[in-house]
Amino acid sequence: PRATLVPMMNNPHHPTGPGSSAPPPFPPGAGAGGPHNQHPQVGNATGGVGGAPPPNNDSYFTETRKGEVNELRTLLRSFDKERNPLRKREVIKKVIAYMTLGIDVSRLFSDMMLLVETRDLVVKKMVYLFLCNYATTNPELAQMCTNTLQKDCSNEDPMVRGFALRALCSLQLPQMVEYISEPLRKSLTDPHGYVRKTGVMGCLKLYHLNRDFADSCGLVDILYDLLKDNDTNVVTNCIHVLNEIMREEGGMRMNRAIMLHLLNRLHEFSEFGVMAVLDLVPRYRVANSDEAFAIMNLLDPLLRTSNSGVALAVVRCFFALTEQTGDDPLVMQRQVVDRVKMPMITLTAGGSAELVYSLLKHVDVLSQRFPGVFDDEYRQFYVRYNEPTHIKYLKVSILPKVANANNAPDIIGELSEYVGDIDARLSRLAVRNMARIACSNAGGDWGAEHVVGKLVEFLDLNVAHVSAEAANALKDVLRKNPSLREHVAPPLPRALKYTTDPIGKASIIWLLGELSDISNEAPYVLEKLIDSYDAISNASVKMALLTATMKMFFKRPPEVQAMLGRLLKYATDDVSTQDVHDRALYYYRLLKASPQIAEQILNNLSACVAIEKTFAEEDDSDMHAALMNEFNSLSIIYGQTSENFIDEEHRYVPAMMAEENVEGAAASLLNDGPAHAHQPSTNFEQPHPQPTSATNGAAPSAAVVDLLDFGDSSPTPAPIAAPSNEGLLLNPNASMTGEAFQKMWGEISSPTLTDSFRLKKLPNTADTEGALGKIFLNTMASGELPTELKFFLYAQESHSGSYLLVQAVISKSSPSFSYIIKTNAKDASKKCNSLIEKMKSALVGFM
Amino acid sequence: MISMIMMLNQKGDILISRQYRDDVSRAAADSFRLEVIAAKETVGPIKRIENCSFLYTRHLNMYLVALTRSNVNPALVFEYLFQKIKILKAYLGEEFDENSMRNNMTLIYELMDETMDFGYPQNCAVDVLRLYINLGSVKTVDDQEPSELTSQITGAIDWRREGIRHRRNEVYIDVLESVNLLLSSTGTILRNEVTGQVQMNTKLTGMPECKFGLNDKLVIDRENYHHGSRKAGVEIDDCTFHRCVRLGKFDADRTITFIPPDGEFELMRYRVTDNINLPFRVIPAVQEEGQTRVSINLKVIANFSDKLYAQHVIVRIPVPRNTSKAKIKVSLGRAKYEPEQQAIVWRVKRFLGKAECMLSADVDLMPTVRKKAWSRPPISVDFQVPMFTASGVIVRFLRVYDKSGYHANRWVRYITRQDVTGYQVRI
């Protein structure tokens, strides 16, 4: 990424053009001029380094001068002699400041490069920034500093390793790929999460730099491995990177094991990470509808976060999952909207204008797709006087969509309050949306009549824009509902006088034409207009006048004949607009040919729209259906599907996960996964009840076709657990509620067995649970305390159905696994012993 | 993903910009200036210019803009931008401006690099960033244990760092409620709702586990059932929480447990629509007597306990535009006709609970050329009532558990005021 040169915007009075090439407005070196002192001095003085003349203006942002860049070079060259680290920083800061302004300081590249060898982390970072900005302009020179960068990539400080790696990958020099790949590969196995997460992003940068090379490195496999990293930030980045690398195939390929693993760890992710995981859920193909519901239950609590990004992502997941439940998706989705309605409204009630705007856009689409759901919350869409205008407009346009027979009076009343607003656009919108209530007949007959009454009032209000809009609205209402025409006729002649807006005027003329049989004055009002035909400048008004006069002619021929003749003459002579001329000629010939046919055409061309039909503009249900697939994206904001506004190379069509063959046992096992995850560990009073619940987080991979080696990292081969079952056969589908566990634990007063064994390596919670899950010793609850890991485990004997309960503690200081087993099974001690054998074999990787 | 983040001043000059992808250029700032900053019509917070979407928010008079060419999740982008502003505030002060931005440019570049990589948000927690980005001091991170440091950068609890110490352990809880009301002229309630916020300021040592309880009806009812007591709870319609709250636990048994961030944060937000105690009753009688006079009689009753009082009560009674003068009598406070507001403004500094105050006014109107009916806008009341909640919500407990077992002092404040939507009575 190279900073292109742009004219300096900093000082509009100096149109000096592209930075350094412009003639300096002051002679070089005269930088101490008065106008530069507007920025207060910061920190230590910048100048005075290495005997250079001290520039006594401390502002970084003065006009560009060749002299100053040269001066910087002098400063940089004397850098070694400078001992004060703060002053060193100031010099580099100045270079960066110039860069920010868009001044070309690439001439300093070689000097800056020399500075990369420093122990000062801040200086280092600034130099990296500079390098990344100008590397493309000096590729050869940039290549020379790769050595330092590579060295930094194996620095002992993980932060330095991370920064260096990020810089190295961001240089964007195609010839550098070989230098990148080695440090990159090393970083992915770095012991520190910070380096790993930077490395993961580096993979994507490499991919963009040279796709074939990245493919040949086999990065994708490593990234899939990293999906089960302990550090959720690494996992989040992995998701992003894989999604982008496989964009053309519809996003990251996934399987059930990956999805469930991610969902089970959801609570460990940061909010941005949660959004990344939730983005995958709509593409997940559930095993059966129970699983879909289990996932929804798992996600449900997230609707309460105050982060609207997360909440909306959950809504999207719900929509996608309900499509797979097998029930009628529209019915199910309506229930979903019912569920998410309150959280969405609470989020709009508080929160910043920007978020409220995007939430309301979503509500707007939902209220059209699922009419009636938001109706009872209509008051939430009342406009507040101090809201930003774009939110006001949005709310006003939502109101008619939530109107029904019960709330229509309130909504109409509220909308008519806005008509008097100072903001003309708001008052126009209010009028238009009142008409929409009448057109959709949402408020019933009463509502439509009431709206017409109000609109007629507005027509008479003598405020130009309101009358015009009201006339236009009335036209539409009458087309839908001609029975209301009696109410409209009386004020029309008056309104015509003070409406100046051409659309309003045309609408009134149209109405006069339609209603000429009940409006006595109509011909005389139009006659005035006809006689001042030359004064009409707008074509649409002329057209409306022509048609209206024609219609009137058939209703009241004696009065109108003369004026129609005059009008046709004026209009056929009118050369200003072709359309008017042609239409007049057409009418003239039509009348000449056969007045009967003319009447038929004009009166049959009744523009009425049946009440059960809608106007074409409002019938966009296909559109809404399409938009629902792109819920929670810019598509909803723009009201267009993404192919309309996203360039080809950025377009992304998410594809569903491939079908998976699931064995019956695995399927039922899996269904327990999220359900357990949802089962809170409230029954255990732990100071840190982190409800980890990855009962089956890793276990399923044993049963599922393990494409990506996505099993547990512990090297326990599954077969070991299987044959060692003499005396104890455990039920793979065992399940137990927390209450039952607690009750049983309490009932068995003395533990059957208490002992411990040492571990060599400290396992983490998920690994332990995964390993024990493989021998069908399931986790009820687990938690991490500062000094120890604690687990409550249970297993069920297959043939007797009796339970074995285990409380296990892994001490962190001296890794050891101590356990208490309680059971009510017969032959208790023998069974306990074989359970211990099983546990040991499962945890063999840590012993 | 995001292609570029820019900060612009009011003139549209780039103060700082960080390009993450090369599908946009700095020249985009020009289109933004022309189509958003200089636009005549107000533009929403999302603007598309030639298939490049600009999502922006403002801080003081600066624009923070995210540019993207892909179909992003707008809420995510805004959450990121807000987080960004929060981080800048933490580093540069609440009211950071153009100058402080310019003077700390390298710091901001560092923050831009840390919070976003190649267009994807990374670590945005201020507390954690502070651990390793501290340009202000010469001290470099070398002094700290790298391993400890990175474990926190990547820890699951990213809103609080370990090892916080306070000499005195204290928690301040503020329950802020806003009531909105719209009464029709006949006295029926058209709209009435309370939105509440629970703000906390925690100064606690270590990683304390907190448990917070309101008199939530669902919890109280359950307790009543178990203990046979009869207490009343408040029916909370809906609520949202800060991300530190364990949501699963709330959904299971409605207990609010969390490890709080250090310092100020908003714990929760809730809405209540039923059984609201209106702090004020307003009984107006406004009569237009012919064309030249309006008589107004108004009674305001404070509906809360007489041990409490309301502050800064302002009642605005609209009068017609052509008012010439008004003779006003009040039983408390001061009232006068303020032509610029087209209203009689009645101010009472301290309004005791259960008190009844009267205002009567005779308004003389000037004759007008054109006859136009007066639109009779609603009367509005502004107020603040300390130690009172309109919803009836009270904080029942806040328990702090830490392994060192210290005692924490807890302070609770309540305040109820009118909502931005207004506390209005139509006449």
Image (cartoon, coloured by chain):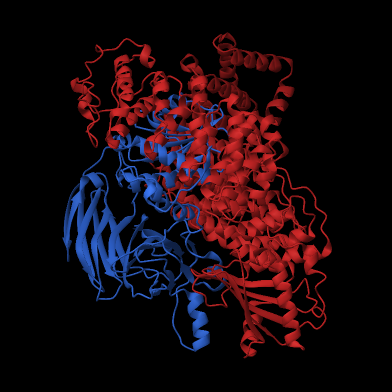
What residue is at 28 percent from the left and 30 percent from the top? A82
Residue A261 visible? The answer is yes
State the quadrant of the C terminus of chain A: bottom right
Looking at the image, residue B34 sits to the left or right of residue A313; the answer is left
Q: Is residue B379 above or below residue B113?
A: below
Can the viewer see residue A499 in this picture?
A: no
B261 relative position to A94: left or right = right
Position of B261 relative to B252 (above/below):
above
Is residue A592 or residue A497 the one in the foreground? Answer: A497
Which residue is depicted at the point 49% across and 55% down? Answer: B151
Image x and y of residue A797, in percent: 77, 79
How many numbered dots are placed on residues in this image? 0
Residue B194 percent location from the top left of the image: 41, 63
Q: Which quarter of the picture shows residue A824?
A: bottom right
Q: Position of residue B200 (x, y in %)?
A: 36, 63
Residue A775 or residue B178, whichever sits in front: A775
Could you say which quadrant of the image residue B95 lies in?
top left
Relative depth, front residue between A364 and A98 = A98
- Chain B pictured colour: blue
Q: Residue at x 61, y 46 (%)?
A: A238
Residue closest to the eye, A747 or A825: A825
* Residue B389 horizontal/vertical position (percent): 35, 69
- Letter of the chain in red: A
In the visual, does A835 lie left or right of B401? right
